[in-house]
Image: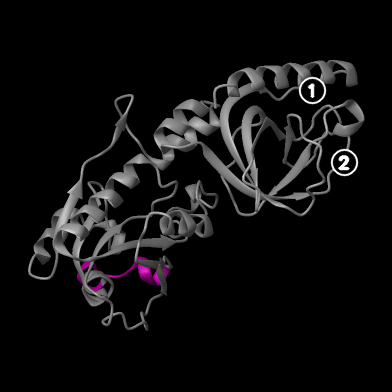
Amino acid sequence: MEIFRLHYPNEEDLSSLEPSAAAIGFFDGLHRGHLDVINTMKKIADEKGLKKMVVTFDPHPSVVLDPSHQRTTYLTPMDVKIKKLEALDIDYLLIINFSSSFAGLEQDFFVQEYIIKSNIKALISGFDYTYGKKGKGTVEDLKAYSDDFSMTVVDKFKYLDEKVSTTRIRHYLETKELEKANIALGRPYDIEGIVVQGEKRGRTIGFPTANIEPNYRYFMPANGSYAVTMTIENDDTVYKGVASVGVKPTFHDNARLTTEVYLFDFNKDIYGENVTIYWHYFVRDEEKFDGIEPLIEAIDGDAKKARELLKDL
């Protein structure tokens, strides 16, 4: 997959790219609605003999357009998004820097400079895609460029009679509805990180944990315990366990958020290893206990419940 990072003004000459079908959108999460758009693009590309392209943006437009609700954490941070798109057999990826200058572009200028000059012959988007200054450009406006490219609009993908969206999935993660989040995503929510030194308190109470420092600015599940699986780079084994997200209120009053994973039947030193946590089920809210014994009892209960939840994976 060839990657092009574009800015405004655009100094990259993309006229030499082979004619492409392009899916356009922010695509945070690459959830089932996004995949509907991308798979439609791939089908059109195959039918018309075009290359497969994805056009996306960085950072999230809210950083420029809506500072009071700006989104600076992601379901799929850009580096993760790139890897997942590469796995989808995409030929070209255009990443456009969403700056204040770019946000102020007139509709036609955006289309001419970033769509037509990129040799895009078929454009595919979700039904609610907007573009140009103040987001006034719509998919209906894009259909007016039929002499330059075809425009295909993909309808909303629904789950529980609601549109599958990044916002909805973030809500599910906030409200500990992991199963709904994973159905909307079409896969277990996953977070990449590195195993770092922690307080090592877990091994003293019989539950040695791996302290995971996320590699990127992920949107984290709500504080609590979860049934998870975890993979370690260069190791084909899928390990099962229980993860804790929180601030360890039994031991701290104002601690930073940490993510720890207790893997079942595991006894290896993995400091410095890159790992991926896959979040499957919510187990229990984070609690502050009056001492070590009730904490041990709770963790033991979490582990038993997680083993049961994960037994058929």
Q: Position of residue 312 (x, y in %)?
A: 55, 22
Label 2 is placed on what type of residue? Answer: Glu
Residue extending farthest right: 204
Q: Position of residue 132 (x, y in %)?
A: 27, 63
Residue annotated with mark 1: 288
> Which quadrant, please, contains the C terminus?
top right
Residue annotated with mark 2: 199
Residue at image x 40%, y 34%? 184
Residue at image x 84%, y 20%? 296
For disc 2, the neighbor class at 10 Å (few under 14, some 14 to 19, many from 20) is few
Asked if residue 291 can be seen in this view, the reply is no
Q: Is residue 104 magenta?
A: yes
Q: Position of residue 233 (x, y in %)?
A: 65, 52
Toward the viewer: 77 or 36?
36
Q: Which residues are magenta?
A: 100-109
Toward the viewer: 171 or 279?
279
For disc 1, the neighbor class at 10 Å (few under 14, some 14 to 19, many from 20) is some
Residue 192 falls left or right of residue 286: left
- Assign a secondary structure to mark 2: loop
Colouring of the image = one colour
Residue 298 falls left or right of residue 94: right
Residue extending farthest left: 147
> Which quadrant, please, contains the N terminus?
bottom left
Q: Is 163 located above or below residue 48 in the figure?
A: above
Quadrant assignment, res 176: top right
Mark 2 vs 1, N-terminal side: 2
Nearest to viewer (mark 2 / mark 1): 2
Residue at image x 41%, y 56%? 85
Residue at image x 83%, y 44%? 198
Q: Position of residue 94 (x, y in %)?
A: 37, 68
Label 1 is placed on what type of residue? Answer: Lys
Q: Is 262 located above or below residue 39 in the figure?
A: above
